[in-house]
Amino acid sequence: MDIADLRAAAQRLSGVANATPVMTSRTLNRQWNGQVFFKCENFQRTGSFKFRGAYNAMAQAQTKGVLTYSSGNHAQAIALAGSLLRISTTIVMPDDAPAVKQAATRSYGAEIILYNRQQTTREQLSQELATARGLTIIPPFDHPHVIAGQGTAALELLAEVGKLDLLLVCCGGGGLLSGCAIAAKALNPQCRVIGVEPEQADDAARSFRTGILQTIHNPDTIADGARTPALGKITFPLIRQNVDDIVTVSESGIIRAMFYLWERLKIVVEPTGALATAAILENIVDVSGMRVGAIISGGNVDLMEASQLFARSELHR
């Protein structure tokens, strides 16, 4: 995969996906004597970057029916893309997926099949259903067309703000990180790219450091978009080739970053979407004096649950 794949994806998405805004915080910039540019994919269609990859993949699929497995954001993205392209969609979703994401997915016309994480794996169930029904599987991250679509977020960011010293990207299965790293290294070779994941779901960080794919079964983190058990066969080598480092942040750090973004930028961000920001606020990554890009991956969160998270946590204003 290379930058040409991302540019082709950008053409397919033109006029369909939102060109999401870039926001800044004067307070944050003063604190670190630099510039931090937040690429706000929470304003993307379906509320996350996932629409980019889902639409790019489905626009090239020669099929009448698509099946995927997702905790929510990719599910919504596939469902909406299917509605726009008139392709039927079936979603295999854990029964503990956020209710707001289940409701949104159904609203786009998808059929949802719930499963218990403790009793089966989504990959096994999806393969059985796809075979029985003759459906095409488009996975959440380990697919070249999905990765290319996700990378258009960084293409847009770099086109708007110019060269960066550092790009911070959240990491679950690695689709967004892989695509954004391809864009950054092609357009801005000196830019360091760092992935960010939860401490309690640190399979990518351990895989990156050891060079051996690591797996965590059902990682326990509030960042539901980062609960993937492992990087993919496509994303892992792309990350090793193009990413400079992967760091982790605590659950409390994720909540503090969410609160900061809600309170200071006045935007709704889900836990996974706050990972890159948490790496800055928790001083996990030194951004002093730098021009930094931070991808806010999504904003699909149950507002009542978020309020409860804030209430239970020790937030330092």
Image (cartoon, grey):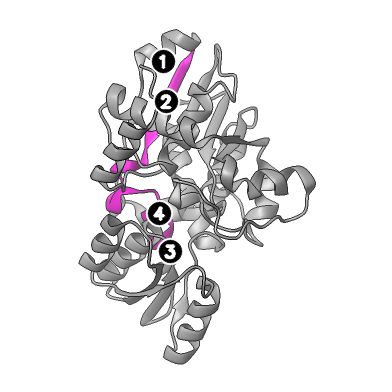
Label annotation for residue 37: 2
Give the mark nearest the N terminus, 3 or 2. Answer: 2
Residue 133 in the magenta stretch? The answer is no
Q: Residue at x 55, y 63 (%)?
A: 143
The magenta region covers: 34-56
Label annotation for residue 70: 3
Give the mark nearest the N terminus, 1 or 2. Answer: 1
SS of the residue at dot 3?
loop
SS of the residue at dot 1?
helix
Residue 15 appears in the rendering? no
**Rendered location of residue 221, percent (x, y):** 49, 47
Give the mark nearest the N terminus, 2 or 4. Answer: 2
| Quadrant housing residue 307 | top left
Q: Nearer the viewer, mark 3 or mark 2?
A: 3
Disc 4 marks a residue whose amino acid type is Lys
Disc 4 and disc 3: Cα gap in Å?
A: 11 Å
**Rendered location of residue 148, percent (x, y):** 51, 54
Disc 1 and disc 3: Cα gap in Å?
A: 34 Å
- Residue receiving disc 1: 28
Residue 45 in the magenta stretch? The answer is yes
Q: Residue furthest bottom?
A: 132
